[in-house]
Amino acid sequence: MLLRVDTRDPLAVAKQVQAHYRVMFGSTDRLFVAQAFGWAIDCFSGNFPDYLANDAQYHDFEHTLQGTLCFSSLLRGRFQTGVEPVLSREGFKLGLLAMLLHDTGYLKHRSDPDGTGAKYTLIHVARSCDFAAAFLRSKGYLPEQVRSAQNMIRCTGVATDLKSIQFLSEEERILGHALGTADLLGQMAAPDYVEKLPVLYEEFVEAARFTGQTSKMVGGFSSAEDLIRKTPGFWEKYVRPKIERDFQGLFHFLANPLPDGPNYYLRCVEANIERLRRMAAR
């Protein structure tokens, strides 16, 4: 099962992503996935000029790896069904980079040592787009490629109106929707998702403090316990409709075996949601 890949281990995730890449595009260009992961590790470890290592506790590098594993699994499933349009090698590569960079907005500048990157929660998508642009330019990517990666990253914004994103192609739209799907399912299917919800709430608290929010409600929640109580509703009223409708139902390509086998990601999310319901009922 894909979720048995240890998402705390970048090398284990990279190995699985490489396997998906090989299924889709053959054994040529063997170095790209390892290179992309190396770049991401550098960014999150404080080895990109003017940026500190990631210090957000929920939106850490494992969070990115969870989404990246789900993203590549989904695209492999889509490839194996033969659905049109077939995604290009270059599209997959740029999508993978966008996935790896989609939460770099939580990284702080070296001149900004106060607090953690969680304070940027409300603006992290825009900051991620800015970081991705600087990073990709430094690696020689063209302006059109940079814009494409930014459009994909914008799909992860909770409040983003997808209709406002001016996608450059249908392939880019599909990749962006896959990225948005994977960002949601990757974290919500994690074995420790329930345990990490209080950590997520603390990120909301820091963001509220940073923006000068004085309301007792933080991100729509009055406490970590309130977040736990309301998460099943978040799944039912926001996430499930979004991945089914707005993101074109791409999560169905995570079925194993295709096309109608069990969807391990969906099963794990629903198991977590059921745990939360039982906790709320106590």
Image (cartoon, rainbow, N blue to C red):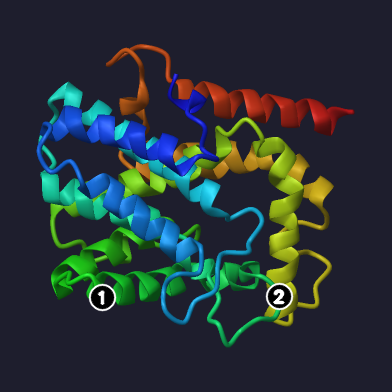
Residue 215 left/right relative to 211:
right
Q: Is residue 249 visible?
A: no
Kind of residue at disc 1 = Ser
Q: Earlier in the sequence, mark 2 or mark 1?
A: 2
Q: Position of residue 136 (x, y in %)?
A: 26, 69
**Residue wearing tag 1:** 138
Residue 219 left/right relative to 13:
right
Q: Quadrant of the C terminus?
A: top right
- Structural crowding at the residue carrying mark 1, measured as other residues with C-alpha within 10 Å and reported as few (<14), some (14–19) or many (≥20): few
Q: Quadrant of residue 84?
A: top left
Secondary structure of the residue carrying tag 1 is helix
Q: Position of residue 127 (x, y in %)?
A: 45, 74
For residue 115, which numbered disc appears in the image?
2
For the view shown, which residue lies furthest in the right direction? 282
Q: CA distance from mark 2 to mark 1?
A: 28 Å
- Structural crowding at the residue carrying mark 2, measured as other residues with C-alpha within 10 Å and reported as few (<14), some (14–19) or many (≥20): few
Q: Quadrant of the N terminus?
A: top left
Report the residue at 70% width, 79% height from top: 210
**Frontmost residue, 234 versus 30:** 30
Report the residue at 64% width, 53% height from top: 58
**Frontmost residue, 107 versus 232:** 107
Report the residue at 73% width, 52% height from top: 199
Residue 170 left/right relative to 53:
left
Residue 152 left/right relative to 240:
left
Secondary structure of the residue carrying tag 2 is loop
Q: Is residue 199 above or below residue 44?
A: above
Kind of residue at disc 2 = Gly
